[in-house]
Amino acid sequence: MATTTQVRRWWAHRRCQRGIPITLLGRHGVLVAPGTEQLWRAFEQTLLATGYGLASNIGSHRNCPAGIGGKTCEPSGKNCSLHNYDLAADVDPWAFGNPHFRRRFGNGWDFSDIKFTEEQVRAVEAIRTTQGSQPFRWLGWAIGDTMHWQINVPPSDVEVDWGTVPDADPPEPEKGDEVLKRGDRGHAVTWMQQRLLNWNPDSLPRFGADGDFGAETETAVVRFQQAHDLDPTGVIGSITATLLHDYAPTTVPADVLRVGDTVRLEPGG
Ligand SMILES: [Zn+2]
């Protein structure tokens, strides 16, 4: 298993570069480093074959200079997350109570806490390149960052050995570009509402960030889209979601934190 430091060295030329957008597990616009597309296809196929289904949200890119834990991603690679290289994907970060955001790193979580099953994690870890390397590393085992998968091979070793990838039907091609829409509820909705409020504190006057995507939230999304020259659909698609990211008050939703908590992000990757 390569260390994150080794991966940073292999891919140093991709530090702070924007990757190319792919559709992964039904989510449009996931940014990945050029050359890794086939690896992510194998990743997707493996999860679909083992019943994971489509994702409601995938985080990939992180803008420099923000590195690990709010530190600066330095030219040497120090304090850089592999998200600064578009070599990592956080799959369904708000699914269930992600232990990463509950700061239960490596202790006290189990598979009943998260959306991945152990079988699914093991199946992704069993993927091999044609050179026999394991191309994906999961940070759930070491630090409880159970949403985080990172590339674990150099640019010269990205050919998939498809014999190690279980067969699956391709994802339904037209799922639309919906991340969140009216009627949705939960952490992801709260997360988006907090960004709407950070954009315009008056945008949700009655209900605030209540985790319920109702009429008030829909109206706020329309206004946000109009203010950003997007189609005013009231549905949060990948582009609206990406622009909302710019209004992050913090990268952790408030409802999983308590007063006195110390926020520590991306400790390993
Ligand atoms: Zn991550």
Image (cartoon, rainbow, N blue to C red):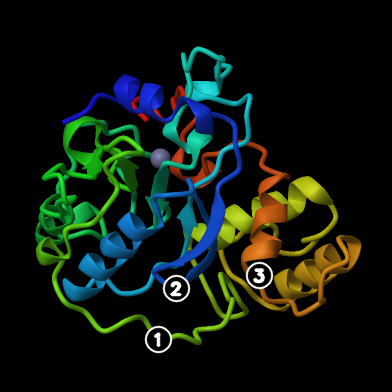
Residue type at mark 3 is: Ile
Q: Which residue is mark 1?
A: 172
Q: Position of residue 205 (x, y in %)?
A: 80, 60
Q: Earlier in the sequence, mark 1 or mark 2?
A: 2
Proximity of marks 1 and 3: CB atoms separated by less than 8 Å:
no
The residue sitting at 46% across, 14% down in the picture is 78
Residue 63 vertical position relative to residue 72 in the rendered view, above or below: below
Residue 209 visible in the snapshot: no
Ligand 1 near label 3 (Cβ, under 8 Å)? no
Q: Which residue is mark 3?
A: 236
Residue 47 visible in the snapshot: yes
Q: Nearer the observer, disc 3 or disc 2?
A: 2
Left/right of residue 172 with respect to residue 197 in the rendered view: left
Left/right of residue 24 with respect to residue 146 in the rendered view: right
| Frontmost residue, 29 versus 268 | 29
State the SS at label 3. loop
Q: Earlier in the sequence, mark 1 or mark 3?
A: 1
Question: Which quadrant does ligand 1 occupy?
Answer: top left
CA distance separating discs 1 and 2: 8 Å
* Residue 26: image tag: 2
The residue sitting at 76% across, 45% down in the picture is 198
State the SS at label 1. loop
Q: Position of residue 108 (x, y in %)?
A: 16, 37
